[in-house]
């Protein structure tokens, strides 16, 4: 396996130090690595990888043991994302998005028997959940929904034009945002969980992109029916601040860190190859130093915020504070920008060998994949949203505030 798993840095959390879990993660990552080029080339769903992930029971590791899972935390999930990101970014991103939704169900199900049954099925059958938060005119504004949940005769229904549902056609269920009712404002949202038997998908638009091609993030018209207890009890505003945003930014960041580590691993291998051949350090050696330094900074930023979230994850007030919301937002921005600059530095370290698509030191796929990172959710959008909140807060008067 490429990247920092073969360099001297530790992983993001201690999970890979657990031999049994480490072996399962590596087994899935080895399958992902074998099929990554084909997945990218054809822009197809990484079916082989997810067969391996299901066989290793990695889709349910954060579900509580009482419901059939392993009760592991976000650190373990981030390690899987990091390992997969080094070999197949599309597989890693799909795994991350699945776990963002699982985290929402686990944390915000309260005493819902219906949602606990869903989680039991997820564990038993290793169900893959997709996410639907992007819609119609609101685009990437996940804090506004157009389509409402309709209530009639003890049933609910939802029809939404989802411009993106990553791997929607390959998922076993979809967890989607929606307006609470037809009379609600767009910001009065709920999160609803539907299994495949509950909905139909009508293609709306395709997915032809530079990178992350295997996420198969086509658009669909989603038509779903179900029962009211499939709506998560907590308002989406709470879910968004406490779980959705932290998990999204930390798990996406772990994927991008993995991509960057893979590129640095390629650059390191290129440097070593040149030295073994007696050619001395290649001209791009200073860029390898820069790439390694920026990767370590990226990982440090990510690990710091991960530890912060683990410490306060059960403190609703701390999670809602401007300090934490600023930290988690800036982490997403910084990690995405650092990931891009790290891969670009690795490319320059490898020179033409990194630029070629037929070289063992090519970083073409890593570069195409990592360029998605500032666009998910657009960095300018989230910085603007943060600025609006920050305008209302007093500035610190000393370094101790």
Image (cartoon, rainbow, N blue to C red):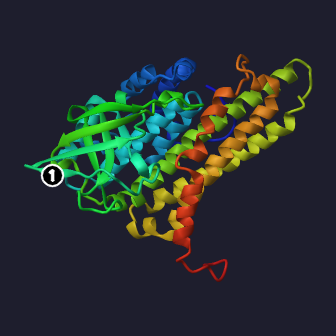
Q: Is residue 278 above or below residue 224?
A: above
Q: Judging from the image, what secondary structure is the residue with disc 1 in?
A: strand
Q: Is residue 171 visible?
A: no
Pointer 1 residue: 151
Quadrant location, the C terminus: bottom right
Q: Residue at x 59, y 58 (%)?
A: 330
Q: Is residue 233 above or below residue 45?
A: below
Q: Position of residue 20 (x, y in %)?
A: 45, 31
Q: Residue at x 7, y 49 (%)?
A: 153
Q: Residue at x 23, y 39 (%)?
A: 224
Q: Position of residue 133 (x, y in %)?
A: 39, 47
Image check: 131 left or right of 291? left
Q: Position of residue 231 (x, y in %)?
A: 23, 51
Q: Which of the pair 326/218 is nearer the observer?
A: 218
Query: Which image quadrant is residue 82 in?
Result: top right
Q: Residues within 10 Å of mark 1 (few under 14, many from 20)?
A: some
The residue sitting at the left extreme is 153
Query: Which image quadrant is residue 356 in?
Result: top right
Image check: 395 left or right of 275? left
Q: Residue at x 92, y 20 (%)?
A: 278
């Amino acid at each position: 396996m490429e990247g920092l798993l073969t360099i001297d840095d530790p992983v993001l959390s201690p999970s890979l130090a657990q031999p049994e879990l480490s072996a399962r993660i590596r087994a899935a990552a080895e399958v992902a690595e074998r099929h990554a080029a084909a997945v990218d080339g054809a822009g197809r769903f990484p079916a082989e990888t997810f067969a391996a992930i299901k066989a290793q029971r990695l889709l349910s590791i954060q579900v509580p043991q009482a419901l059939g899972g392993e009760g592991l935390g976000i650190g373990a999930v981030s390690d899987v994302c990091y390992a997969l990101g080094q070999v197949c970014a599309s597989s890693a991103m799909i795994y991350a998005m699945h776990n963002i939704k699982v985290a929402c169900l686990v944390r915000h199900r309260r005493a819902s028997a219906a949602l606990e049954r869903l989680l039991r099925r997820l564990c038993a059958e290793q169900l893959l959940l997709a996410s639907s938060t992007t819609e119609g005119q609101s685009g990437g504004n996940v804090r506004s929904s157009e389509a409402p949940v309709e209530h009639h005769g003890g049933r609910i229904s939802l029809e939404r034009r989802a411009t993106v549902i990553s791997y929607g056609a390959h998922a076993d269920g979809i967890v989607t945002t929606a307006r609470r009712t037809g009379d609600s404002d767009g910001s009065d949202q709920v999160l609803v969980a539907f299994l495949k038997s509950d909905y139909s998908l009508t293609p709306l638009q395709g997915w032809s992109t530079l990178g992350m091609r295997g996420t198969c993030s086509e658009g669909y018209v989603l038509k779903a029916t179900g029962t009211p207890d499939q709506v998560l009890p907590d308002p989406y505003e709470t879910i968004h601040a406490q779980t959705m945003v932290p998990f999204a930014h930390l798990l996406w960041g772990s994927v991008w860190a993995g991509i960057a580590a893979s590129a640095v691993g390629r650059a390191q291998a290129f440097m070593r190859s040149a030295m073994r051949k007696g050619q001395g350090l290649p001209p791009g050696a200073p860029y390898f130093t820069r790439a390694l330094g920026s990767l370590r900074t990226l990982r440090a930023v990510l690990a710091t915020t991960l530890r912060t979230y683990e410490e306060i994850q059960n403190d609703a007030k701390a999670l809602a504070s401007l300090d934490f919301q600023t930290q988690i937002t800036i982490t997403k921005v910084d990690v995405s920008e650092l990931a891009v600059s790290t891969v670009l530095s690795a490319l320059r370290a490898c020179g033409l060998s990194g630029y070629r698509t037929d070289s063992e030191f090519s970083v073409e796929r890593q570069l195409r994949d990592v360029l998605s990172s500032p666009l998910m959710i657009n960095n300018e959008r989230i910085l603007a949203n943060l600025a609006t909140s920050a305008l209302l807060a007093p500035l610190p008067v000393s370094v101790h505030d």
